[in-house]
Image (spheres, rainbow, N blue to C red):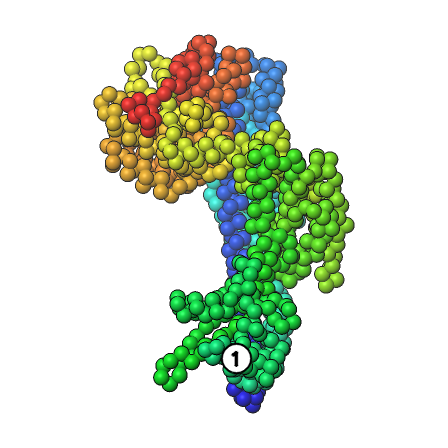
Amino acid sequence: MTNDNLKQQKDSQLKAIYSLFILAVMGFAILLLLQAISLSRTQINYQNELMNSVSQSILKELTQTMNTQRLKIALFLSANQKAFERQASNPKNVDEKGYIDLLHKMRNELPSSRLYTIISPSGINLLEHITGNFLPDCLEEVSETTQLGQQQRLFLHRSKSSAHYDLIQPRHPGNPQKGYIFVAFNIDFIANLLQKYQLPFQQLFLLRNDKTGFIEVSSETTTELVGTNILDQQTLADFEHSLSIPNTRWSFAIRLDPQTKSQLLNKALWQSLITWTIITLLLFFVLLSIKRNLESKYISQLELNESRKKAEILINSVVEAVFSVDRNFKITFANSSAKALLNMTTPELLGKPFPSVCELYNLQETQIQSFNRLIENFQDNQIPEYSNLTLKLPDLTHIPVAVKFALIHDNEAQVKGFAITIEDLSTAVELSKRLVYQESRDSLTGLFNRRHLEKTLSKILEHSKQGLTNSRPAIILIDLDKFQLLNTSFGFEAGDEFLKRFAILLRKSIPGNDLLSRLSSDEFAVIIKNAGDQELVSICENIKSAVRKFEFDWRGENLNVSICLGVVKIDANFSDINDVLSAADHACRLAKTKGTNITQFYETDDPEIQLRTQEVTKLTDLKKALNQNNLLLYRQAIVGIDTNNKSQQKYEILVRIKDQNDNIILPSNFIPVAEKYGFMAKIDFWVLAHTFEYLAAQGERDSALYNINLSSKTLSEKRLIAFVESLFSQFSIAPSRINFEITETSAISYLENALDFMYAMKSKGCTFSLDDFGTGLASFDYLKKLPIDFVKIDGVFVKDLASNRNDRVFVEAIHNISAQLKIKTVAEYVETEEIFNIIKDIGIDYAQGYHLQEPEYWYSISNNNG
């Protein structure tokens, strides 16, 4: 392409780029305007979602608090049953002192309670002579509750000086004919609840459903709504969200602060304007950069055109030295390269015997190779070239060469002579040396690379194993902290320059005869050939001291770095270099957990290293067990306590691991590792598949019911339902024989998945147990939400029943509430006869523990006959 064409091309490209710049700026302006509008809408929608989340959270906490208060009332009634029975049976004899004493006890259990009274089945206040007459609202609520048998429409009652709400429930659960307990509570916690969940820009109100616009409680103290108890229709229309509260006359209503919507749009527009300005500036700088690049390419192309003209002159010459000799090997022709190679003129060369001008050596021999012998080999064996020769020049220097032979024929096809081409290999040999150098060096820093370090480390380890050395070698792994952040913040150019300077710093900080190498982008290693512990500590301190003083200045920014060091003393105990490098990496990672500029020696008796090593070992054992099917299934009986009820035998499936030495590993030694590294789902799916397979193989020999545990990770698997359904289809196991045990925590963590799985399996006929019940945050609440058939009371409440009264009260409460919900109870950790008798006295349905049966071996792949 001519220079004129190049200029036209450059101008055309610049014009196109200017047009694209204008279009891009205008396009971004439009897009950002649309984005601002969309963003403001998104933020308003987000506020609506927050309102929904806030209302759900308030509803949940309010419901939990009310349920807790009702439960505490039930427990207080149970604990003071005789006192309440005396007051209910002879209310007129109840004096103020006896009432006050019992009220004080109640307030100790229920701090927010104000008063209590006992109500007859017909709604009469039996303690009216002490508590006074009901307020009209209270009387209305009492009348409605006694008619329905339960309190369904809770609301606040107001006097001139205060407000409260009442909880009314049967004194005997499930038997309202024996009368009710009435407890009045302060409303402070409701107001606090609204304040607790109030988010910026939101106003929260508790409104009456049956009185339009009537405010019960509000989060506001300084708005235009304060000072009135009734909201007009226009104000109610401003509320974006409302949620009715079940079993009450209340609704939560939430609205955005009136100025928020316009502020959101204005903020989005300003952000878009700032973003557009920044993008425009960036595009402008990019435009300048592209323009400079085009002009630079234009100049380079002009220079290239000039170089091509020169190359056209040089291309006609031959680089190799070319000779022609006659049958007597006298030189008849030599090109310019040949003359330059030998530093001789044409008259000096022509007619001279070739061997007298060019003495050739074989690189692998010490004597001069006979030129006649080379020609004979060529003629006899047709060896056209030699690439391993050395040429002795007239000035007595030696260069490596490759020699090619070809026959020259006359017109009658007779050999007239020979063409000899000599290629100077000096450059190629030098390049080869460079390649060898580069193969063992890091291209950026010039340090040895990982390949060279591994070779050196392998030799050192081999000598240690063979006892060929008395030296004390070690390796120090140096890890740069947050190097990727430097690359991200300042670019790869800054990162590369930093690594170069850092490599120089390390080279100056270690002994000169030790090997320094770069292993990866931010890792370096030093092989210390011979050093004791104190010398190693000193070397590490030298390195850290140098790094602390090191300041990397990049375009006016001073950057400091920190490192972590992992030190391993190399001895014959390591099986290979991978073990050594793994140990160094292990030590380095442990150093990172302790801070910056930390040195960590790898010591096999270090507790922290032992702990991490044990964890890795357990994970390895678990992987092997899963891959090799070395899991074992045990079972433990779940015994019915009522001897008159001959129910079907029940078992819980338990899993164990058999290691390579046939030792049995208990769950406590591998379940935590499985949960940490995501292997619980694999274990659960293995247990499911092999339990179904073995039950099918047993046929009529085993008709027991089996409980199978499912972890939270398994419940989160979308394929769980299809997998279990395929097992039922494949092995034809009656679903009624399978009970799935899930923990309260796992059910809460994946509530939607858990409910989907539970309803799918319940529809087939399976049952469910809620395991470890009582240890969660909202146990009783989830008894209503989850389709549970059995509650397994956590062993923490069972194991001390004989000595802990509170545990007994809690177990009784769980059993009583479960019984009301028609849920069977199972007590775990029944270890003694005394505990068994206590849970039998309470009325627990089933028991499980070492007192009844220790876990027994049931199934493994290697012995599937049980």
Q: Position of residue 377 (x, y in %)?
A: 43, 66
Q: Secondary structure at mark 1?
A: strand
Instruction: List the single residue furthest toward the right.
Output: 549
In the visual, does 857 lie left or right of 329? left
The type of residue carrying mark 1 is Ile
Task: Residue at 43%, 68% (x, y): give it.
Answer: 376
Residue at 44 percent of width and 20 percent of height:
828
Nearest the viewer among 499 and 476 is 476
Q: How many marks?
A: 1
Q: Residue at x 61, y 64 (%)?
A: 271
Give the answer, above or below, for where 378 lies relative to 442: below
What is the residue that sits farthest to the front in this orientation? Answer: 328
Q: Position of residue 200 (x, y in %)?
A: 61, 50
Q: Residue furthest bottom?
A: 4
Closest to the observer, 818 or 826:
826
Residue 406 location (% of width, % of height): 43, 75
| Quarter where residue 854 is shown | top left
Q: Label 1: which residue? A: 331
Give the side of residue 857 with respect to residue 453, left or right.
Answer: left
Answer few, some or many: residues within 10 Å of disc 1's Cα (few below 14, many 20 plus, some between 14 and 19): many
Residue at image coords 37%, 85%: 411
